[in-house]
Amino acid sequence: MTRPHHVPVAVLGAGSWGTALAIQLARAGSPTILWGRNAGHLREMRKTGENRAYLPDVPLPPNLHPEPDLAWTVTHADDLLLSIPSHAFRETLSRIAPLLSPETRIAWATKGLEPGSHKLLHQVAGEVVGRERPLAVISGPTFAREVALGLPTAVTVAANDPRFARSLANRLHSGSFRPYTSDDLIGVGIGGAVKNVLAIAAGIADGLGFGANTRAALITRGLAEMMRLSRALGGRRETLMGLAGLGDLVLTCTDDQSRNRRLGLRLGEGESLEQARAAIDQVVEGIQAAREVHGLARQHHIDMPISEQVYLVLHEGRPPTRAVESLLNREQKTETE
């Protein structure tokens, strides 16, 4: 069933991406509630009519309501959209689970794997709120500020229920925002996690001064790694050739709006991980994702050499130059291996 636009939707997470999605939902006609952990931040948003901390100078639509009370937010919306770091995903779902009605549908715009377990987020959601509940993920080549400003954007909405996929896509759709629907939660989840790791690799390569040829090769071979892992888990090739795979990978590897790419740039230029993180001063999902992707690849015996070298640089202290040498000195293979 497609929910009418007058039924509120709630976004949990008032950072840049959550706010941008809330703005888009409101712009497309849905009354929208925006919740965040910092009550003072939410009250300031109400007063100023913008999110000055994360999206300054972007006005909030009049039908977007910042709300500091989580229980009120969850019980006053039929659809919930989580935009939170992957490390807080299970905790947030567990917190809201007792508040959910049987009709509440859950979506997320979080990219990554669960820390420690390497689980895809739809697996975590199924464990916490039930696999029979409609679940969906929004992914694709999206920078928050561009979405908030209404610049043309396309995304993938994948769900375990085609009616929910269509309904959520309909809520988001506007003249500048085009969602495409899918049922491949695995492929979309893998694309969103692995692309952050590869963006760090692209940043490192550019920080080392390796140029456009290297970047193009890295993106292409990185896509092959992404596909191998997704296929092993049951995802579909065409998903990774679409917006949630190749589209997001190209965006994140080539534009300095990407925090993951900027982290890699700083590492390639000689900064320590601690220095690079301090300079960016926001969550860089690829750091944790590198550990989880490495663990998942080893668990399923999948060869992912670029992702492995990023893991070694971030978590084992390998110098970036040595990581590059390791990649270049690998044995010869056919391109399809």
Image: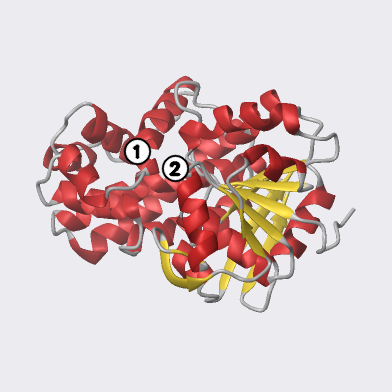
Q: How is the image coloured?
A: secondary structure
Look at 58% across and 60% down and name the residue there. Answer: 21
> In the image, what residue occupies the spot 55% across and 61% down?
46
Residue nearest the viewer, comparing 192 with 71: 71
What kind of residue is marked 1?
Ser
In this view of the protein, which residue sits in the foreground, 76 or 154? 76
For label 1, the residue is 307
The quadrant holding residue 135 is top right
Check the image and report above or below for 298 versus 65.
Answer: above
| The image quarter in which residue 125 lies | top right
| Viewer can see residue 44 | yes
Q: 302 and 330: which one is in front?
A: 302
Locate the C terminus by quadrant.
top left
Residue sitting farthest toward the left? 270
Residue 272: x %, y % from top left: 13, 40
Name the residue tied to disc 2. Answer: 194
**Position in image of residue 2 (x %, y %):** 86, 57
SS type, badge 1: helix
Q: Residues within 10 Å of mark 1 (few under 14, many from 20)?
A: many
Q: Indicate the secondary structure of the residue bearing disc 2.
A: helix
Local crowd size for mark 2, using a 10 Å CA cut-off: few (<14), some (14–19), many (≥20): many
2 or 1: tag closer to the N-terminus: 2
Query: Would you say residue 336 is visible in this rendering?
Result: no
Disc 2 to disc 1, how far (Cα)?
8 Å
Amino acid carrying label 2: it is: Val
Circles 2 and 1: CB atoms closer than 8 Å: yes
